[in-house]
Amino acid sequence: MYKLVAIDLDGTMLNHYGEISEKTKEIVKKCIEKGVEIVLASGRPIDSIKTIANDLGIKGYFIAGNGALVYDIQKDEIIYENYIKKEKVLEIIRICEENSISYNVYTDKVILTPNLKFNVLYYYKENLKKEESKKTNISIVENMYEYVKNMKEENFLKITICDDSDSIFHSIIKKVREINGIEVLDIAHMSRKIIKQGTEEIPVEYFYTEISSNDVDKWNAIEFLIKELGMKREEIIAIGDNINDKKMIENAGRGIAMKGSTPEIIEVAKEVTDTNDNDGVAKVLEKYFI
């Protein structure tokens, strides 16, 4: 019997507009009423995930920064953390600045960015539809290196690097991989998102990777959590679509990929559900719990 479901957000629970359907909300709430532990497992920072968790009525836990931390919603505190060191963040910033490539620094509270492009532009547009208390905290920083160097708080979740040129992107990733003590997510395909602007739909496409500290992974965070809750690996369902979901899908009792997921995810999944635009997550939850 399954007791906990770890669910990715972008490309999985969220549709291509960054929204959760009413059907999915309804099914998630029914599962919670039945005692199922629903855990959101995302690369997003705390406030962005907390807003979604609150809307869904999740009272337990979520995983942020691709596994860099586990957050206890009831206690309103971080119970597990594995942050990337400041000196590594500064090394990566220097490489990105020297090569004029787009990047963002995620702390546990805010996304720091030199400009609104690619994934941060998507979050910014998402914010325009939200009330103030539910917005993802984004801060545009003019001199990122000096700003980060002088920061007193050092809770760095991850760095994302983005570019719409395949050759430029991969040349920078090659340089970043030479840094010790970090994990560079191996994402080979373009990210595709849709931004609504009035009646117009604008596609945002870019190559990207996510960089974190060594051993940061959604599955490692799940393992910590299930030990805390006294559960077994066999009692876990994990649902995702991208390479940062691979280990949790491989290791969970039931690893499930979204239709249209990156091929590496389809290969390791025990099951494939429908797409994020066709309530794939809701269909899994209905099948196993409703």
Image (cartoon, grey):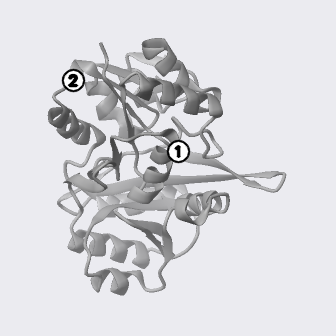
Q: Quadrant of the N terminus?
A: top left
Q: CA distance from mark 1 to mark 2?
A: 28 Å
Query: Secondary structure under badge 1?
Result: helix
Query: Secondary structure under badge 2?
Result: helix
Query: Where's residue 136, x and y in %?
Result: 51, 62
Which residue is more in the foreground, 201 or 223? 223
Residue at horizontal 47 percent and vertical 59 percent from the top: 169
Task: Determine if residue 259 is in view.
Answer: no
Q: Is residue 204 above or below residue 179?
A: above
Which residue is more in the foreground, 109 or 26? 26
Q: What amino acid type is highlighted by mark number 1?
A: Asp
Which quadrant holds residue 99?
A: bottom left
Query: Where's residue 26, x and y in %?
Result: 57, 29
Residue at horizontal 54 percent and vertical 46 percent from the top: 190
Residue at horizontal 29 percent and vertical 86 percent from the top: 150
Query: Where's residue 40, x and y in %?
Result: 40, 40
Of the two numbered discs 1 and 2 in the rendering, the one whose residue sits closer to the viewer:
1
Residue on which the image places disc 1: 55
Residue at horizontal 33 percent and vertical 40 percent from the top: 60
Which residue is more in the foreground, 182 or 198? 198
The disc, 1 or 2, on the residue closer to the chain's N-terminal end is 1
The residue carrying pointer 2 sits among few (fewer than 14), some (14 to 19) or many (20 or more) residues within 10 Å by Cα, namely some
Q: In the displayed structure, does residue 278 sit left or right of residue 180?
A: right
Residue on which the image places disc 2: 233
